[in-house]
Amino acid sequence: MTAKIIDGKRFAEDLRGRIAGHVARLKAEHDITPGLAVVIVGEDPASQVYVSSKAKQTAEVGMNSYKYELPADVTEVELLELIRRLNEDKAVHGILVQMPVPKHIDPNKVIEAIDPAKDVDCFTPANVGKVQIGLPGPVSCTPLGCLMLLRDELGSLEGMHAVIIGRSNLVGKPMMQLLLRDNCTVTVAHSRTKDLAAVVRQADIVVAAVGRPQMIKGDWIKPGAVVIDVGINRIDAPERGEGKTRLVGDVDTAAASEVAGAITPVPGGVGPMTIACLLANTITTASLINGLTPPSDLTA
Ligand SMILES: Nc1nc2c(c(=O)[nH]1)N[C@@H](CN(C=O)c1ccc(C(=O)N[C@@H](CCC(=O)O)C(=O)O)cc1)CN2
C-alpha cells in the first residue's frame, strides 16, 4: 500500500479563501474589519519566518495586520504593557505573542496578560477551559488544523482509536480534547509510555507531536491508519551539500507511507494549517467581540 498524501498546503489555501469571504461579509454587513496583532520578541530566525507569514496572510485575506517587533532584551514589564494596550485597542480582535519568548520572560505571565476575548492562540486558561466543555471561542491553531484535515479525510471520526504521541499544552492536550469531542477513543502517549510501538499499532489515527525527528517508525503503523505528523525538525542533509539541512517530521514518512492509508507530509502538511487556523480564530474572536455567531466552518 502507498498512502495518500494529505496536502495541508492546498487545504490551507482553500481555507484562507473561505476566510477572505467571511472577512468581506463582516465588512459589508457589519462594518467590521478584523484586526490581528502579532508580537515577536528577539531574532529567532524560524520565529521571524512564521511571524512574517502570519502578517502577510492576515493582510491577504483582507484583515488589518499589526506587527510588533521587540528587541531580545525588552523587559517583561514592557512586553506586558504592550499587551495591555492591545487589549484596550478596539481595532484589534486578536493578539498573539510568538513562542518561544526569551528566557528572562515568563511565558505564563505573557499568556495570562492577554484578554481571553482576543486570545487567538487559545493559550489562556479561560479558553483552554472553554474548549474542554465545548463553549464557543478560539481553538488551539495546530490541533484545529489537524482536526480539519482528519475530518476532511475520514468524515466522521466516531469510534476511532486515536493515539496522540506528545502531551504538550500547545498540541497534545488540546488535540486530546478535540478528538474526544469528535467521539474518538483517545490515548495520549508520551516519553514515559511503555512499549510505545505496541500502543501506536492500535491506532486508527496517529497524531505525532513529540518533537523528535523520524521517531515513529513504519512498522509501528497499523495498515490503513491515518497519520498526522505535527513535527517540524531541521536535520543535517549532507547529501544536499556541506552544511545543508532539511525539514523532517516526527514520523519516518517513507516507511510509514508503505503502511498507512493517508499521511501528512513535512513540510506542506500541518504547518500551513497552523497559520490558516490562526486567521480562522481571528474571525471567531472578531465575531464574538461584536456579539455575532462565529462561522461554523472555521471552528471545531
Ligand atoms: N504563539 C505561537 N507560537 C508558536 C506557535 C503557535 O501556534 N503560536 N506554533 C509554532 C510555530 N508556528 C506558528 O507560530 C508555525 C510552525 C510551522 C509553520 C509552517 O508552515 N511550517 C512549514 C515549514 C516552514 C519552514 O520551512 O520552516 C511546513 O510545515 O510546511 C507555521 C507556523 C511555535 N510557536
Image: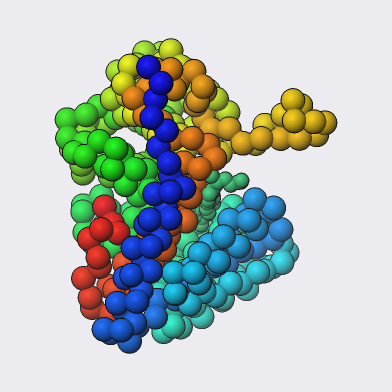
Q: Which residue, as the protein is rendered here, is positioned at the far right?
A: 242
| Total tally of numbered discs in the picture | 0
Residue at screen point 69% across, 60% down: 42
Residue 277: tell me if it is visible.
no
Residue 29: tell me if it is visible.
yes
Residue at screen point 43% across, 12% down: 219
Which residue is nearer to you in this view: 70 or 221?
221
Task: Identify whether 285 is placed above or below 145.
Answer: below
- Residue 114 image position (x, y, % from top left): 45, 68
Q: In which image quadrant can residue 7 be found?
A: top left
Could you tell me which quadrant the N terminus lies in? top left
- Residue 11 image position (x, y, % from top left): 39, 49
Q: In which image quadrant can residue 190 be found?
A: top left
- Residue 184 image position (x, y, % from top left): 21, 34
Which residue is nearer to you in this view: 130 or 215?
215
- Residue 238 image position (x, y, % from top left): 76, 26
Q: In which image quadrant can residue 205 be found?
A: top left
Q: Which residue, as the protein is rendered here, is positioned at the far bottom?
A: 31
Describe residue 276's horizontal placement relative to residue 21 as left or right: right
Which residue is nearer to you in this view: 157 or 12?
12
Residue at screen point 61% across, 72% down: 68
**Colour basis:** rainbow
